[in-house]
Amino acid sequence: MSQLERVRAAFAAQGFMRTLGAELTALAPGRCVITCEFRADLTQHHGLFHAGVLTTLADNACGFAAMSLLPDGGEVLSVEFKTSFLRPGAGTAAIARGEVLKPGRTLSFCRADVFMRQPDGSETLAATMLATMMAAAPAPR
C-alpha cells in the first residue's frame, strides 16, 4: 500500500471526520484538501460554521499533508498550531487546503487556509493555520 493510500485509510478511520461529514477531496505529496458541507448542527450561536469545525479541518489538512511525505507506515500527531480567523465562517461549505512548508524527519511545518464556498461558487478566505506536526507511532488503544 502506498503512503497516499495509507493517508486515505487513516482519514476514513477518523470517526470525528465522519461526524462532521468531512471528505478528503484532494491528496498529493505534501498537500491535502478537506471539504465539509454546511449543516446547521456545525454552527455556533450566530448560525456560522463553528470555529472548532474550521480549526479541526485545518488541523487535519496539515496533518495528512505531513503524513503523505513520511516513509511507509509513518504517522503524525499535532504538536502545536495557531489559527487566525480572518472572516466569519459563512458559506455553503468549508474547504481546508493544507500544505507542508518544510518537511522533516521528526517535525514538519505546515500551513492550511480555510475557504468558505459561497452560493455562487466563489470562495472567501476565512481562516489560516500554521501548524507543527510530529512523526510518531502512537500506541493503539
Image: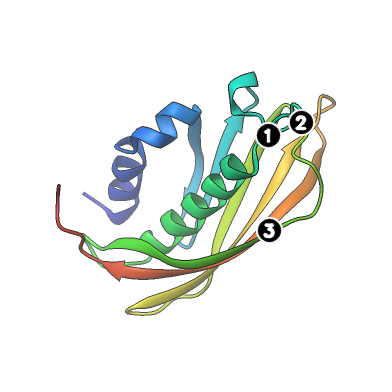
Q: Label 2 sits on what residue type?
A: Gly
Mark 1, residue position:
49
Residue 74 coordinates in the image, percent (x, y): 25, 63
Local SS, label 1 = loop
Which residue is at 56% across, 56% downward? 98
Which residue is at 65% across, 29% downward? 43
Residues marked 1 and 2 touching at CB (< 8 Å): yes
> Disc 1 or 2, which lies upstream in sequence?
1
Between disc 3 and disc 1, the foreground one is: 1
Mark 2, residue position:
91
Which residue is at 49% across, 27% downward? 21
> Disc 3 or 1, which lies upstream in sequence?
1
Residue 39 coordinates in the image, percent (x, y): 62, 21
Mark 3, residue position:
128
Distance, label 3 to label 1, CA atoms, is 15 Å
Between disc 1 and disc 2, the foreground one is: 1
Q: Which colour scheme appears in the figure?
A: rainbow
Position of residue 101 in the picture relative to residue 117 (left or right) = left
